[in-house]
Amino acid sequence: MSVSNHPIAPYVRGAMSLVEGPDGLVIAQRFFPKQLEHLASIGRERRAASTAGVVLDFATNGTEVSLDCRVMRGLDASHPIYQTVMGGEVTGKKPYGLAEEGNVDGIDFVVDGRLVATVAAATTTLRLAFENPNHEELEVRIYLPTIMNIAFGNLRTNGTLKPLPQRGYLLALGDSITQGFVCGQPSLSYPAQIASTLGLDLVNQAVAGHTFDEDVLGGSSLWRVDPPEIVTVAYGTNDWSRKRSAEAIEGDASAFLERVHRMFPNVPTYVLSPLWRADEHESMPCGRPLTWMHQMLCRVCSRYDNMRVIDGYHGIPKDPTLFADGSLHPGAECMGLVADIMLEAICADSVDLIVRRHVDKRMGRAFAADEFVSREARIDHVTSLRDGSPETHPQFDRLVRTIWRLRQPDGCPWDREQTHQSLAKHMVEEAYEAAEAMREGDVDHLREEMGDVLEQVLLNAQIAYEEWTFNIDDVCRELNEKLIRRHPHVFGEVEELERPSNSEEVLQIWDDVKRQERAEDGRRPGLLDSVPVSLPALMQAQKISKRAAKAGFEWDTVADIWDKVAEEREEFEQEPAGSDRAVEEFGDMLFALVNVARRCGIDAEEALARSNAKFRRRWAAMEAHAELEGMSTAALNELWDSVKSEE
């Protein structure tokens, strides 16, 4: 009996339907009725009844959630795989992340995008408390078991409980690996990781032990009305290890993938060829090596423009310790590797999908799934098609991981002790050293100093990530969005006739966009609020005078400003030497001089930097000519003039 009107129904994702269970609870069905009939006919009904990929998704401002759960079909403790995994025969330890002894399946609680607990699926009331001191609205996802079949209901929180809009979905097809068999944590199965990264819901229609035939896709015509955003197919090794003919395997693969194509002709489809198996060198009925499966799939998928084959065999290390059973089924770490190689392909092809974000990490709250930033992705895609467009930067990812490693418990004590506050002075120092290298024109020095600046950026981003505020991806994303937003003349938001012809017009566009942003945010900042008080005084003076002049607070001519300099000098000379008033008047005189520089098109900071460098150079030349200590003022001046004339 269908119970689509059950109170828990609005929070369920990944189920084709809900049916009545015991005690007012419900059971999620991952397949359509006709599919279930076929799976029962081939002896796969037990695996099809699991809740793999089914998630409860909601927002709450509370600090705890609870869910009633009843195990309808548990694990078979006598199964050889169960005994191998739980015995730790391969890795010498229990499977990664298991909640308690005897559990190779569980329920994951993910709060604000972070896995906070894995608990054993049991007939009980599951409760989770989490930190939310400001009672912000957070997204909570409860991942149900991948192997077991449970009934569930009575979802409760001690705060608000709000269903989130349904997103587009990822359809995952395959066998036990796709189902997340003995992974131990349902949120870490590779389909769950891909869907979470792309901001999609997940429909996991994998069945452990399944051999690929097109009938398993029968009765799913509703998908034509609401097709997935992406389809993944993990073409496992069941056919290879059971069927006697290579021709039969290829024929079945052709029929299965042909039906997938007919159902979703315009949906990007990624076919993962089989992963390594410990028994790959044993004789198989089909008489073909495991690597033949990849070649066969390439032949089949080459017929379809929307299908791409991903090499699972070479993409995953042939390391038994990465597999929960030591031979066939990936553990959680290996699942992450599978997700990585598939995401690399998806992100290269499916531009509009990679930018969906279902949780705003910076604000710590959920927002609607239809808030996409696909415009930035489309712009990037168009840019990437240009000749000479930069490719990926693996060295950057390595550096991010190195910084992460330094902050680990067994990392560097100095790096682990740092905070945003302690690093503030280092950020300033490194920026100045990089600026000095720029002025020197020394490219080797500049490369080194830019690396030091980047280290500060990454270290602060890592600290922020540990504090659950933002990470380096947020930094890059926000900067990219701002650059695109503030360059409408480059990225297509202004007509050709309106395009700026010089830098001044560009700066005017920049300021106009900033004012619009403030208006949209409801902000009414003062004219000078955007000038950081942390800047050096001379740089502040330049920015302040420029903004005031744009607002009309300006002298008519440069001569008028020189008159102001003379006036300020006179006022300075009238004050007692060393007094506070003298300091203030001297500052006024400098501020007036900055305005002279601005009107003459001179960067006062750069001009003073050059003078400093020139003085350093000449003083060094004097020291090279003579011992300066003890020389009279007249002798020093004479030597200065000599060095100056030599220049």
Image: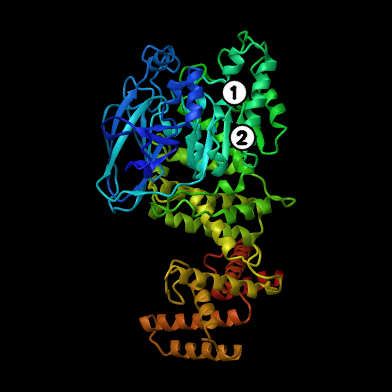
| Three-letter amino acid code of the residue under disc 2 | Tyr
The residue that appears at 44% across and 57% down in the rendered structure is 425
Q: Classify 513 as above or below 161.
A: below
Q: Nearer the viewer, residue 50 or 592?
A: 50
**Disc count in the image?**
2
- The spot of residue 82 in percent (x, y) is 40, 16
Q: Nearer the viewer, residue 589 or 402?
A: 402
Residue 417 in the image: above or below residue 609: above
* Disc 2, SS: strand
* Kind of residue indicated by mark 1: Asp
Q: Quadrant of residue 557?
A: bottom right
- Say which label, 2 or 1, has the lower sequence index: 1
Which quarter of the rendering shows the C terminus? bottom right
Nearest to the eye among marks 2 and 1: give it. Answer: 1
Label number found at residue 270: 2
Judging by the rendered image, the residue that carries numbered circle 1 is 213
**Residue in view at x 59 percent, y 56 percent:** 375
Category of crowding for the residue at label 2, using alpha-carbon neighbours closer than 10 angstroms: few (below 14), some (14–19), many (at least 20)? many
- Up the image or down, 337 lies above or below 374; here it is above
Q: Position of residue 217 (x, y in %)?
A: 56, 30
Question: How far across and how far down the image is residue 98, in percent?
Answer: 36, 26
Query: Helix, strand, or loop for circle 1?
Result: loop
Question: Which residue is painted at 38% across and 50% down in the image?
Answer: 419
Q: Nearer the viewer, residue 93 or 253?
A: 253
Badge 1: few (under 14), some or many (20 or more) residues near its Cα, within 10 Å?
Answer: some
Q: Which residue is depicted at the point 43% across and 74% down?
A: 525
Cα–Cα span, label 2 and label 1: 18 Å
In the current view of this chain or complex, which residue is farthest to the front? 1
**Residue 136, which numbered label?**
none
The front one of 10 and 275 is 10
Q: Is residue 278 left or right of residue 108?
A: right
